[in-house]
Amino acid sequence: MERVALVDLLDRLLAGGVMIAGDLVISIAEVDLVRVSLRALVTSVRDELLRGDELLREEEP
């Protein structure tokens, strides 16, 4: 198994981006009391700004 430093792992995740999603439900006696939907997008700001610029250029006539 390859050992990867935490910094290298974070660099890989930020370079490609990662989407994390999950749901949390708190219930008593099969009655849902609280429902929380969690969504997170982890990416580097620089990469997203570059992608946004590319999209704007594609939309221009």
Image (cartoon, rainbow, N blue to C red):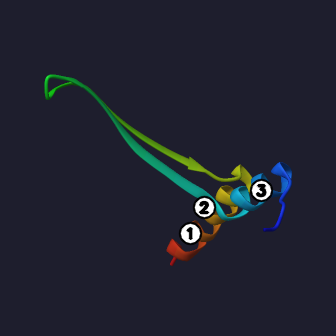
Residue under the point 41% across and 44% down: 22
Furthest residue toward front: 1
Instruction: Check contact, mark 2 vs mark 1: CB within 8 A.
Output: yes
Q: Disc 3 marks which amino acid?
A: Leu
Residue 25, percent from left and from top: 29, 32
Q: Residues within 10 Å of mark 2 (few under 14, many from 20)?
A: few
Please tell me whether residue 24 is drawn above or below residue 5 in the rendered image. Answer: above
Please identify the quarter of the rendering in which residue 28 is found.
top left
Q: Secondary structure at mark 1?
A: helix
Q: CA distance from mark 3 to mark 2?
A: 25 Å
Name the N-terminal-most of marks 3 and 2. 3
Q: Which mark is residue 55?
A: 1
Quadrant of the snapshot with the N terminus: bottom right
Q: CA distance from mark 1 to mark 3?
A: 28 Å
Q: Which mark is residue 19?
A: none
Q: Nearer the viewer, residue 36 or 31?
A: 31
Q: Nearer the viewer, residue 19 or 54?
A: 19
Q: Secondary structure at mark 2?
A: helix
Q: Residues within 10 Å of mark 3 (few under 14, many from 20)?
A: few
Residue with the mark numbered 3: 9
44 with respect to 37 (left or right): right
Label 1 or label 3, whichever lies nearer to me, is 3
